[in-house]
Image: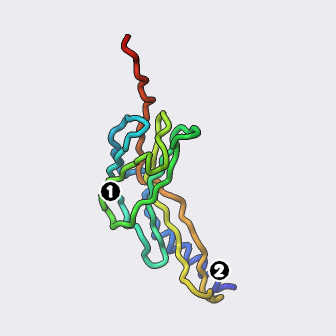
Amino acid sequence: MKRLLLGIVLLSLAIAASAPVALGAGTRVRVSPGRGGIHTNFVLRFSIPDATGTTGSVDVADSVSISGPGHKGCVGAADLPLRSAPAHAAFTFTLNPSHLHGHWCTGTFTGALVERRTTICPPGPVRQSIVCPLYVVAPRVLGRFRFTVAQPKKATRAG
């Protein structure tokens, strides 16, 4: 029992040490255009501070999370994973509403670049002397952004 408890404590300390110290949103995320229509592709540009992918027993993954007004028949929220990349890799990421199976809802959207860390347990049977709990470190917001989707203008008749 002491070995099991010691294993849990050591793994917890290792994961805590691997998590970055800075908790603030320090990554600049540029979005263009800042205002568009229901079919506009919004382009994000940013670089990630930490390498993503699997290293040892820790997996680091980044995603772009957006939320805005939600109405039936339009896109109001999404959580989109990013590919694995080395630290400081530059990304150009397009938010295309047709890839999200629709068009944007109108209104202001807020978004975040989010990093998640989890442990990976080795495959195969687990022995009692090896402890491998599945930890998920609280998601870390790396950067924030916003954009606005305007209502399409109605056509007017010339009389």
Q: Secondary structure at mark 2?
A: helix
Q: Nearer the viewer, residue 158 or 88?
A: 158
* Residue 60 found in image quarter: bottom left
* Residue 34 found in image quarter: top left
Q: Residue at x 49, y 44 (%)?
A: 102
Total labels: the figure holds 2
- Height in image: 39 above or below 51? above
Can you see residue 29? yes
- Height in image: 58 above or below 31? below
**Picture disc at residue 122:** none
Left or right relative to 106: residue 8: right
Q: Residue at x 63, y 89 (%)?
A: 127
Can you see residue 23? no
Q: Nearer the viewer, residue 48 or 26?
A: 48
Q: Position of residue 19 (x, y in %)?
A: 46, 66
Left or right relative to 69: residue 129: right
Q: Position of residue 122 (x, y in %)?
A: 54, 82
| Dot 2 or dot 1, earlier in sequence | 2
Q: Tell me the quarter of the image containing the C terminus.
A: top left
Residue type at tag 2: Leu
**Picture disc at residue 5:** 2
Q: Secondary structure at mark 1?
A: strand
Q: Residues within 10 Å of mark 1 (few under 14, many from 20)?
A: some
**Picture disc at residue 91:** 1
Q: Residue at x 48, y 47 (%)?
A: 66
Mark 2 → mark 1, Cα distance in angstroms: 42 Å
Q: Nearer the viewer, residue 92 or 128?
A: 92
Q: Position of residue 58 (x, y in %)?
A: 48, 73
Q: What coloring was used for the rendering? A: rainbow
Q: Position of residue 38 (x, y in %)?
A: 43, 37
